[in-house]
Each structure stands twice: as structure tokens, then as C-alpha cells.
Image (cartoon, helix red, strand yellow):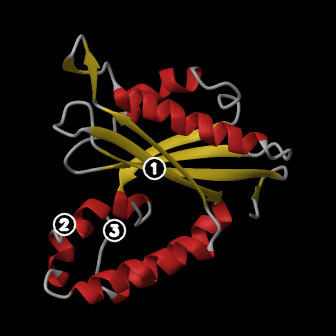
Amino acid sequence: MGLADVGGGIGVITLYCGECGDSTSECRFVCIGGCIASVKTWSIFEEEWRQVLDRAEIRAFKMDDFEHYRGEFAKWKDRPNEHRAFLAQLMTVLQKHLFVYLAASEPVYKTMDGKLVMRDDPYFDCLVAILDSASSYLESFELGEKVQIVFADYAEHSSPARQLLPEARGRVGGLGDRLVSDAYGCLSDVIPLQ
């Protein structure tokens, strides 16, 4: 995977994260997924991804809506072959660009004294796991690259990462001095991917 050179020859790698579920919902699991690539690779990827979305007249890809034929994806409810073909086109773009994929999932509930009780904050544990994975990946490079993290924000809720990232960063060694920035935004404003 190539690195985009940014001032002084130091590469910047972007970690884009999206999540599903949160500790206040009725979800049984909280999940965070992410992809890491150089800024240059993200730029090429975004252009090709956007072409697939534009051909299908889709503004942004959100797996939950896609899978349940909601919103822009309702048009394929009676056309499953077109639905699957669209996803296959997107997966081809992903595979072509050799991203590093990260994922973490934590149950919202645990069993305590024979009863199902809500855990303190499974989202926090997922966030720490993603940051730890990203840090481990970055340690494999010896070029001194920095990382910028981008979190998707959703109309229905703001990313919990806004509040939790400072503490989560403190739990992951080696990432603090490499973090260039963190950003939050609507899928279609940040990158048309989730």
C-alpha cells in the first residue's frame, strides 16, 4: 500500500470508521468497522466508489438501509438480482484498493448472577479495540507516518466517539503522537461509504 507524502516526506494514513448500534438503543451488539489507506488511495477509491453510486442514483451507501431495502434502496425490493449486483460492484472497488480492514464488536448485555444486565459501555471497548488495531498496524511501518481518523455521523445520532475518543486514545499506547486529527461528518460529506 502506498503512502501519500505530506510535507517533510511523512505519510498520512486515514482510518475511516462507521458504527452500528449504541449503548442506549435496543441493539444486542455494538460494532465499529474501519478501513485504513493512504490519503492518495482514499482519493482514488472515493472517485471509483462515487461512480458506482452515481450510476445507481444512490447518494451514500449505508449497509443497514441497503440490507433492509430502505430509503434509496427500496427501488430494489422486487429486484434482488440488481440489489446483489450493486453490492458486488461496490465490493470490487473495495478489493481493488487493498485496504486494511478493522472491526470490533461487543455485546451490550452480560450475564451477572444469572440475570442479563447492560454493560457499562461496550462502544468504548469497541473504540479502544479499533484504535489498538490501528496502532498495531502503524507499528509495522517504519516511515513515521501519521494517522487521521474520520468517524461517520448520522442524522439519527451523533457518533459517541466525539466524547469517548480522548479517553480511548489514552488507553492505546503509541497512537497519541501519531494522531494528526479526528473528524466527524455526514456520510455523504465525509466519504460516501459506510
Which residue sits at x=38%, y=61%? 189
Residue corresponding to mark 3: 61
Image quarter of residue 78? bottom left
Q: Nearer the viewer, residue 94 or 145?
A: 94
Residue corresponding to mark 1: 33
Query: In the displayed image of the protein, which residue is found farthest to the front?
Result: 114
Q: Position of residue 139 (x, y in %)?
A: 77, 39
Image quarter of residue 95? bottom right
Is there a contact, CB below 8 Å, between mark 3 and mark 2? no
Q: Which element carries disc 2, helix, strand or loop? A: loop
Q: Position of residue 118 (x, y in %)?
A: 23, 22
Which residue sits at x=25%, y=67%? 67
Residue corresponding to mark 2: 68
Give the residue type that dot 3 points to: Phe
Image quarter of residue 194? bottom left
Q: Report the Cα–Cα distance between label 1 and label 2.
A: 19 Å
Q: Report the Cα–Cα distance between label 1 and label 3.
A: 14 Å
Q: Which element carries disc 1, helix, strand or loop? A: strand
Left or right, 50 with reference to 1 = left
Please report whichever mark, 3 or 2, sits nearer to the chain's N-terminal start. 3
Please report whichever mark, 1 or 3, sits nearer to the chain's N-terminal start. 1
Relative to 188, residue 95 above or below: below
